[in-house]
Image: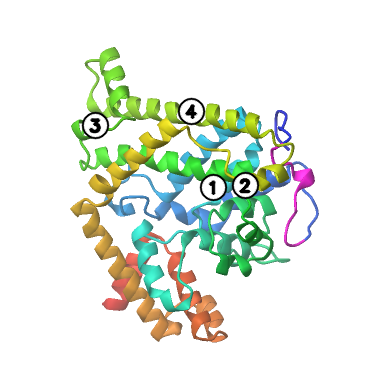
């Protein structure tokens, strides 16, 4: 159920592959709206407010968290979805859930947990997001997880190895068949990249790790700086950055809409099944803007994510995750009963996965507090 008409190639809930467990429909909401609402009310989603995006949550109140990032991804994607006549509630649901399985401490936490789990299948937050909505959320009497629609789950699972795809059932089939996700899933993926690229510029500047002189060398930033500075020569740096980033996002989103519209017109898909069978993704940036986007990403990798202050946080965060994993693995009863009881019923690999589930669900501050408790 959504305002406005859907294109023939959009996901239509009347043609959906449905839910894993049958349940009655909602009286006043469409099924994808229902998914979005279940995600918003989930425990995993609420915890994102205290999980790192770039800077650890306690470093400052104004830096982005996984929650604010997810909201910004959804805002970008909804704009594009409406312009392309895609399913807006489905797009929003995917965006809000895409990081729901992320560890504390951002990618530093994920890398550390993946290393701890190397002998037990590894850890990847994208797979964990699907695991959270399929199995770990405990909200309903009749089924585990949130029992989301197939298309929502398909969009959450952005990438997957063939090995993992074989055990994921319906949602893993497209990776084995080399098919594309629906356009809403494709859109959520690129909206994620657009949001973190542009908004990390803001957080990096706010933290004093990026300067305007550095940023002016970037092809996405430089021309917008010149334009804003010409129009508002006396604007202070704080408002200057906001105005530039706003224009950067507008340029990238406009390009995405126009280039995707061209791709759809060329491919002429008559249904979502035609989209899935296409040789390549349709929701993509033009070559020129994509190169500028990648240039900014490389710049952030070098000057923000690899900054010594950020690396120092990374080292501390990874030590916390490793020591938590070692402690819980050696004594499963040091975890809460709901996790230790599950671990008792598992073999070594299964116990490790339960430990990973527990750690991945932690917020930054809870992980820090737990680490202080076990090392006191």
Label 1 neighbour load within 10 Å: few <14, some 14-19, many 20+: many
Residue 375's quadrant in the figure? bottom left
Residues shaded magenta: 9-21
Front residue of 217/83: it is 217
Instruction: Please report the residue visible at 34 percent of the width from the left and 43 percent of the height from the top.
Output: 297
Label 4 neighbour load within 10 Å: few <14, some 14-19, many 20+: some
The picture places residue 256, in percent across and down from the top left corner, at 51, 32
Residue 217 image label: 3
Front residue of 93/226: it is 226
Location of residue 177 with respect to 209 vertically, above or below: below
Asked whether 31 falls inside the magenta stretch, the response is: no
Q: Are marks 2 and 1 in contact (CB under 8 Å)?
A: yes
Q: Earlier in the sequence, mark 2 or mark 1?
A: 2
Residue 364 image label: none
Q: For mark 1, what is the residue?
A: 96
Location of residue 315 with respect to 235 vertically, above or below: below
The picture places residue 175, in percent across and down from the top left corner, at 60, 58
- Between circles 4 and 1, the one closer to the viewer is 4
Label 2 neighbour load within 10 Å: few <14, some 14-19, many 20+: many
Q: For mark 2, what is the residue?
A: 36
Instruction: Please report the residue visible at 31 percent of the width from the left and 30 percent of the height from the top.
Output: 219
- Between circles 4 and 2, the one closer to the viewer is 4
Q: For mark 4, what is the residue?
A: 255
Residue at disc 3, secondary structure: loop
């Amino acid at each position: 159920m959504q305002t406005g008409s859907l294109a023939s190639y959009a996901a239509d809930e009347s043609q959906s592959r449905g839910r894993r467990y049958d349940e009655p429909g909602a009286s006043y909401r469409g099924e994808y709206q229902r998914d979005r609402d279940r995600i918003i009310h989930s425990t995993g989603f609420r915890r994102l407010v205290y999980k790192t995006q770039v800077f650890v949550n306690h470093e400052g109140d104004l830096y982005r968290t996984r929650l604010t990032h997810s909201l910004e991804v959804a805002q970008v994607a909804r704009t594009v979805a409406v312009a392309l006549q895609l399913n807006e509630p489905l797009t929003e649901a995917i965006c809000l859930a895409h990081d729901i399985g992320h560890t504390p401490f951002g990618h530093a936490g994920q890398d550390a947990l993946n290393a701890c789990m190397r002998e037990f299948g590894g850890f990847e937050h994208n797979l964990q997001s699907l695991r959270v909505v399929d199995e770990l959320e405990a909200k309903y009497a009749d089924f585990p997880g949130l029992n989301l629609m197939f298309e929502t789950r398909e969009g959450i699972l952005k990438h997957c190895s063939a090995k993992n795809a074989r055990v994921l059932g319906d949602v893993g089939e497209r990776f084995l068949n080399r098919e594309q996700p629906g356009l809403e899933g494709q859109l959520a993926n690129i909206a994620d990249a657009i949001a973190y690229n542009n908004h990390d510029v803001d957080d990096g500047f706010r933290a004093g790790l990026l300067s305007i002189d550095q940023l002016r060398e970037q092809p996405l930033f430089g021309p917008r700086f010149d334009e804003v500075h010409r129009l508002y020569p006396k604007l202070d740096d704080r408002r200057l950055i906001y105005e530039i980033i706003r224009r950067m996002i507008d340029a990238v989103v406009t390009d995405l809409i126009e280039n995707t519209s061209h791709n759809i017109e060329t491919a002429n898909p008559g249904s979502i099944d035609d989209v899935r069978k296409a040789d390549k993704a349709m929701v993509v940036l033009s070559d020129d803007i994509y190169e500028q986007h990648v240039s900014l990403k490389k710049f952030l990798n070098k000057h923000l994510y690899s900054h010594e202050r950020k690396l120092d946080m990374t080292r501390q965060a990874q030590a916390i995750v490793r020591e938590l994993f070692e402690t819980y693995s050696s004594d499963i009863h040091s975890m809460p009963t709901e996790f230790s009881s599950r671990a008792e019923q598992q073999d070594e690999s299964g116990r490790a996965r339960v430990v990973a589930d527990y750690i991945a669900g932690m917020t930054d501050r809870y992980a820090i507090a737990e680490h202080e408790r076990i090392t006191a």
